[in-house]
Image (cartoon, rainbow, N blue to C red):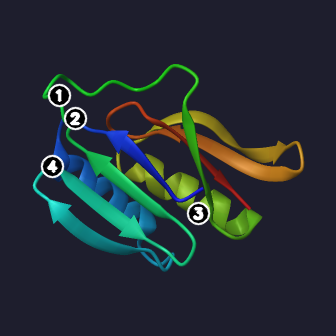
Amino acid sequence: MNYFVVGTNNMKAATAFYDGLFDGLGVNKMVASERMTYWLADDFAFAVALPFDEKPATNGNGTMVGFNVGSPDAVDRVHQLALDLGAADEGAPCPKGPKYSGYVRDLDGNKICLSD
């Protein structure tokens, strides 16, 4: 995968949320324009964007983006951090298949998986 983009209705709030979520994970922010902000790592890019068609952003039913945060302890820590930043809990961290994962929804309702 090259990149993943989720929509937002509030760029300022979304940027603050992901700045906090990615703090300490080696992900660097790049503001591409007033309508799109990227966070770049060695092997992926993630962005939040105001929709091009200027209609309200909505979350996709069945859509989820996953971030590998490195270890079960990091999953626990980043899951709690996301909740502290205003995310909604979608599943406490626990073993899920071959991974240890926790789930949240960001401020716009986009589903995020945090795994080891």
In the rendered image, the vertical position of residue 106 relative to residue 38, given as above or below: above
The answer to whether marks 3 and 1 mark residues whose Cβ atoms lie closer than 8 Å is no
Lower position in the chain sequence, tag 1 or tag 4: 4
Work out whether residue 92 or residue 24 is closer to the camera in this orientation and state it.
24
Query: Which residue is identified by label 4?
Result: 35
Q: Residue at x 15, y 49 (%)?
A: 35
Q: Residues within 10 Å of mark 2 (few under 14, many from 20)?
A: some
CA separation, marks 3 and 4?
30 Å
Q: Is residue 87 left or right of residue 116?
A: left
CA separation, marks 2 and 3?
31 Å
- Residue 44 circle label: none
Which amino acid does the dot numbered 1 rest on? Asp
Q: Residue at x 40, y 40 (%)?
A: 106
Camera-side mark, 2 or 3: 2
SS assignment at label 4 = loop
Q: Residue at x 88, y 42 (%)?
A: 97
Q: Quadrant of the N terminus?
A: bottom right
SS assignment at label 2 = loop
Q: Residue at x 42, y 61 (%)?
A: 21
Query: Which residue is identified by label 3?
Result: 77
Camera-side mark, 3 or 1: 1
Query: Which residue is identified by label 1?
Result: 53
CA separation, marks 2 and 4?
8 Å
The answer to whether marks 2 and 3 mark residues whose Cβ atoms lie closer than 8 Å is no
The answer to whether marks 2 and 4 mark residues whose Cβ atoms lie closer than 8 Å is no
Query: Which residue is identified by label 2?
Result: 51
SS assignment at label 1 = loop
CA separation, marks 2 and 1?
5 Å
Q: Position of residue 80 (x, y in %)?
A: 53, 54
Lower position in the chain sequence, tag 2 or tag 3: 2
The answer to whether marks 2 and 1 mark residues whose Cβ atoms lie closer than 8 Å is yes
